[in-house]
Image: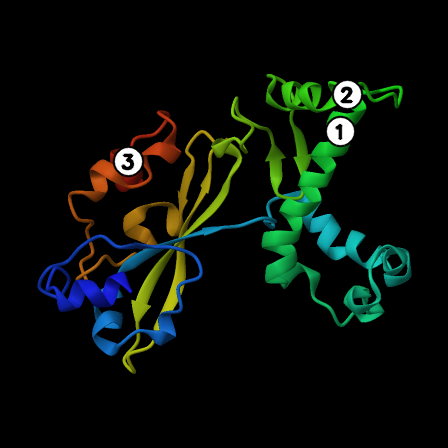
């Protein structure tokens, strides 16, 4: 792993603090104690699907999900994949399900996008030979967007999800006295807001974020590079760091 290799090559260490931004899926528990010490004060980006601020997700997670039933889905699935009714019962916590909130919402919105685009391109139900091309044009044209479970859904000219509609949360990776690592949310990103970065407590300093090396202020390179692309020219990383 790169962290362990960096320690061996002495390019990482407590005396050589770096700004480390960790990817999703990293198994923090599998790291050596030395690596965990280096990661204290790192940042981790997490892509979030449904948020409590989105009324559509809140309604779906509290009501809509429980109106579904296994018998409605099972005939369309191979027998080994038949769903249990308990999945839609009161014992299943839809609001706090990682997979439903962060994966299911995007799958739901993907299907919704295809359906809405199909209705736009072939309103009468007649599908022409150039249906796929027209679908693509409609998706990438200005003006196509809708409110989904993962927030506002719209696409850029390449057909990718518009980065301004992303739900991103920023976590601080901290080491406890026993050497274990945990994550604490310090900020969230809403590209459609006037001030896209919302820090816990109202500012970066108030959020309590700790940087690599246990420092309370960010390394200089953070002011130059951190998430500058995601700012989309509307908010520089320097403004992100000031956070006031």
Q: Residues within 10 Å of mark 1 (few under 14, many from 20)?
A: some
Work out which quarter of the rendered image holds the N terminus and state it: bottom left
What is the CA distance from the residue labelled 1 to the residue labelled 3? 36 Å
Dot 1: element: helix
Between disc 2 and disc 3, whose residue precedes?
A: 2
Between disc 1 and disc 3, whose residue precedes?
A: 1
How does the figure colour the protein chain or chains? rainbow
x, y (%) of residue 108?
70, 45
x, y (%) of residue 60?
74, 50
Residue 61 seen by the camera = yes
Q: In the rendered image of this protein, does residue 157 appear above or below residue 173?
A: above
Q: Quadrant of residue 146?
A: top right
Q: Residue 120: which numbered mark, if any?
A: 2
Q: In the rendered image of this protein, does residue 11 appear above or below residue 33?
A: above
Kindly indicate whether the residue at mark 3 contacts the one at mark 1 (C-beta within 8 angstroms): no
Kindly indicate whether the residue at mark 2 contacts the one at mark 1 (C-beta within 8 angstroms): yes
What is the CA distance from the residue labelled 2 to the residue labelled 3? 39 Å
Q: Residue at x 20, y 74 (%)?
A: 34
User: Which residue is disc 1 drawn over?
Assistant: 116
User: Which residue is disc 3 drawn over?
Assistant: 237
Residue 244 seen by the camera = no
Query: In the image shown, does 7 or 194 lie closer to the viewer?
Result: 7
What is the CA distance from the residue labelled 1 to the residue labelled 2? 6 Å
Q: In the rendered image of this protein, does residue 36 appear above or below residue 233?
A: below
Q: Residue at x 26, y 55 (%)?
A: 20
Between label 1 and label 3, give the one nearer the viewer. 1
Query: In the image shown, does 146 or 103 lie closer to the viewer?
Result: 103
Q: Residue 57: which numbered mark, if any?
A: none
């Amino acid at each position: 792993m790169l962290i362990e290799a960096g320690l061996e090559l002495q390019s990482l260490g407590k005396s050589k603090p770096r700004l480390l931004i960790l990817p999703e899926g990293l198994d923090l528990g599998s790291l050596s104690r030395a690596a965990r010490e280096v990661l204290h004060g790192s940042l981790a980006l997490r892509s979030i699907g449904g948020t409590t601020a989105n009324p559509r997700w809140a309604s779906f997670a509290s009501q809509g999900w429980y109106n579904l039933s296994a018998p409605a889905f099972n005939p369309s699935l191979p027998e080994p994949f038949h769903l249990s009714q308990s999945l839609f019962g009161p014992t299943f916590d839809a609001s706090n399900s990682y997979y439903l909130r962060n994966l299911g919402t995007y799958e739901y919105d993907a299907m919704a996008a295809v359906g809405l685009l199909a209705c736009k391109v072939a309103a009468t139900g007649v599908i022409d030979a150039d249906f796929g091309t027209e679908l693509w044009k409609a998706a990438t044209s200005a003006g196509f967007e809708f409110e989904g479970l993962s927030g506002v859904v719209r696409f850029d000219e390449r057909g990718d999800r518009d980065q301004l509609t992303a739900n991103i949360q920023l976590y601080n990776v901290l080491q406890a006295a026993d050497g274990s690592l945990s994550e604490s949310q310090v900020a969230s990103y809403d590209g459609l807001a006037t001030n896209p970065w919302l820090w816990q407590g109202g500012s970066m300093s108030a959020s309590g974020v700790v940087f690599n090396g246990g420092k309370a202020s960010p390394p200089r390179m953070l002011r130059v590079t951190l998430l500058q692309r995601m700012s989309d020219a509307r908010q520089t990383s320097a403004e992100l760091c000031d956070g006031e």
